[in-house]
Image: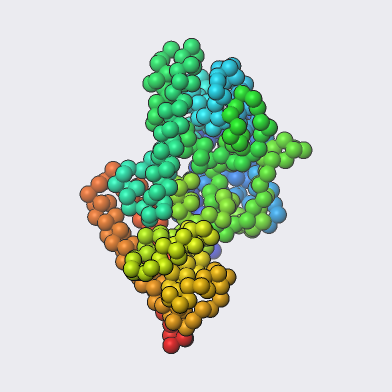
Amino acid sequence: MKKSRGRTGRKRRRKHLQSFMDGVNCSHKLEYIKLKKWLKDRGFEDSNLRPAQFWGTGRGLMTTKALPAGDLIISLPEKCLLTTSTVLSSCLGEYIMKWRPPVSPLIALCTFLIAEKHAGEKSLWKPYLDVLPKTYTCPVCLEHDVVSLLPEPLRKKAQEQRTTVHELYMSSKAFFSSLQPLFAENTGTIFNYSALEWAWCTINTRTIYMKHSQRECFSLEPDVYALAPYLDLLNHRPTVQVKAAFNEQTRSYEIWTNSQCKKYEEVFICYGPHDNQRLLLEYGFVAIDNPHSSVYVSSDTLLRYFPPLDKQRNAKLSILKDHGFLENLTFGWDGPSWRLLTALKLLSLGAHEFTCWRRTLLGDVISARNEQQTFNITAKICHFLIEETQHVLLQISQLKRSKENLKKHLALVEALRLEDLKILQKSAEILCNLNMTTA
């Protein structure tokens, strides 16, 4: 008998397969050794979590023991957290205190990250800065060619995000200039737009929620940010349940799991019940088979199927707008949403049925004709969105071949669009089955 078929061979094969599926341990890498030592000096020591590279999610944390539901995943001491208190206790503190009008907590944290990154070896936070991403995939970082391939509602939000960051930069330039006495190099070179974009993305994608008391030296915007080294390596999974909060007794930020996790598996947390458009907008990634995901139907798409000659069209639109029925109209894994169907039912009301619009918003059946027309238009919209999504996927495929530098960003939009296509195809199947049962 061959040795490879014995118990030792089976163990070896299982171990090899497990390491491939569960992830490659990265704790031997110098940047993680330095980070763990830095955290240990600040009171954090953990023997159960290891940084690892995973096939599906990239960098994350692996557990070296089985975690039962209700177990503590991580407890990070307050000394390890980077907050506005950290910023105020640094050399930036006195400049922030005297600046008027006061800067926001967000700008204070951005300024600190840029300054510490510029300090290089001299920074006390260097071990943490060294493991932060060098680039991000939030929409603000995407090229125009890539943003144009996003679904319409997300495309609009991406443009708003870009405007927000640009305005933040322009409104902070005078404050950045006031910091010149702290630097030998010109502050315009250090605190440039790309530096602010990187710092903004770091805070937007990696901070935990931690409420701080209002300080006079900051603007009235909520001070709710905290960067949590090591803890921020935990990736998101929509189906996982956790409990996370700052423990006033232990003075540590703690995460407890409500889900089981096997030994050597990746440990996940949940950032919230977000759909993929929200995840891409806020965090720069897409979750495969996300149960919270939906495909949004714009009001322009909605109106393609209703004649402009309808004398009551403007009145119908006004009613929908006043009652909030022109937003969050979606197709999901379980088909068209109630909100979408209700909006279509109201738009499908005949001239003699228009007085029943209040009953329509309450979900009442008005007539068999109205129900059938609503169903037909819902199916048409679904098929239109399927064709549109397939067309965009073809465009992405062609761009990936011609624009090598955009490949990573295009792959992200492709993942979003593929998820959208799965949802729309599932909705089309549900509508088809529904039509067969009612025929």
Q: Quadrant of residue 99?
A: top right
> Is 69 left or right of 291, judged from the image as shown?
right
Residue at position x 39%, y 44% in the image? 159
List x then y, in percent, for residue 190. Answer: 41, 22
Residue 341 or residue 348, whichever sits in front: 348
User: Which colour scheme appears in the figure?
Assistant: rainbow
Residue 85 or residue 58, whichever sits in front: 85
Residue lying farthest bottom?
Answer: 439
List x then y, in percent, for residue 19. Answer: 49, 53
How many labels sit on residues?
0
Q: Quadrant of residue 392?
A: bottom left
Residue at position x 41%, y 54% in the image? 153
Quadrant of the drawing holding the C terminus? bottom left
List x then y, in percent, for residue 263. Answer: 60, 54
Residue at position x 45%, y 65% in the image? 316
List x then y, in percent, for residue 269. Answer: 59, 51
